Amino acid sequence: MGVQDIIQGKKQWRAHLARVKALPPDYQIVYQEIQRYLFKVGPVDLADGNLLSGLVDFFEEGAATDRGVLDLIGTDVAAFADELIKDSPTYADLYQASIRAEHGTAEK
């Protein structure tokens, strides 16, 4: 990754954050909680940026129709976040698989 790639990545991240800040306050709070959760859980494909930008797209559409954020995602924010990444491998999954491979145990 070159310097230009890093600079471009920062520009894209700042533009993304500007979109988040333009959302209504309740949407911003829920977005930040989901983002924090995803950063902890660590879906492997989070770095490609499509998941978070798609979430902002979804929230922008909901806000444009004057719907509350909990009307869109339900009252269980964690369940919504889990549903977003249900088919995505996480770093924890990769780590567990490497341990199983190292010890020759079958997946349970």
Image (tube, grey):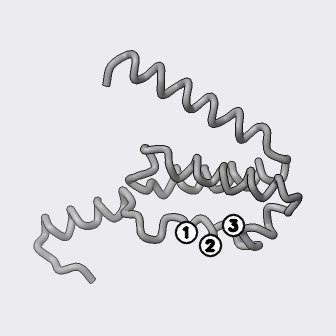
Query: Looking at the image, which residue sits at the far right?
Result: 66
Q: Which residue is mark 2?
A: 79
Name the quadrant of the C terminus.
Answer: bottom left
- Label 1 vs 3, first from the N-terminus: 3
Residue 101 % position (x, y):
14, 67
Q: Nearer the viewer, residue 90 or 96?
A: 90
At a point 28% along the width and 66% down the height, the residue shown is 96
Q: Where 13 sits versus 30, above or below?
A: above
Mark 1 surroundings within 10 Å by alpha-carbon count, few (fewer than 14), some (14 through 19), many (20 or more)? some
Q: Callout 1, which amino acid?
A: Asp
At a point 39% along the width and 60% down the height, the residue shown is 90
Q: Which mark is residue 59?
A: none
Distance from the alpha carbon under mark 3 to that under mark 2: 5 Å
Query: Are dots 1 and 2 in contact, CB under 8 Å?
Result: yes
Q: Callout 2, which amino acid?
A: Ala
Distance from the alpha carbon under mark 1 to that under mark 2: 5 Å
Q: Which mark is residue 77?
A: 3
Query: Looking at the image, which residue sits at the far bottom?
Result: 108
Distance from the alpha carbon under mark 1 to that under mark 3: 9 Å
Q: Which mark is residue 82?
A: 1
Quarter of the rendering containing residue 17: top right
Q: Nearer the viewer, residue 108 or 16?
A: 16
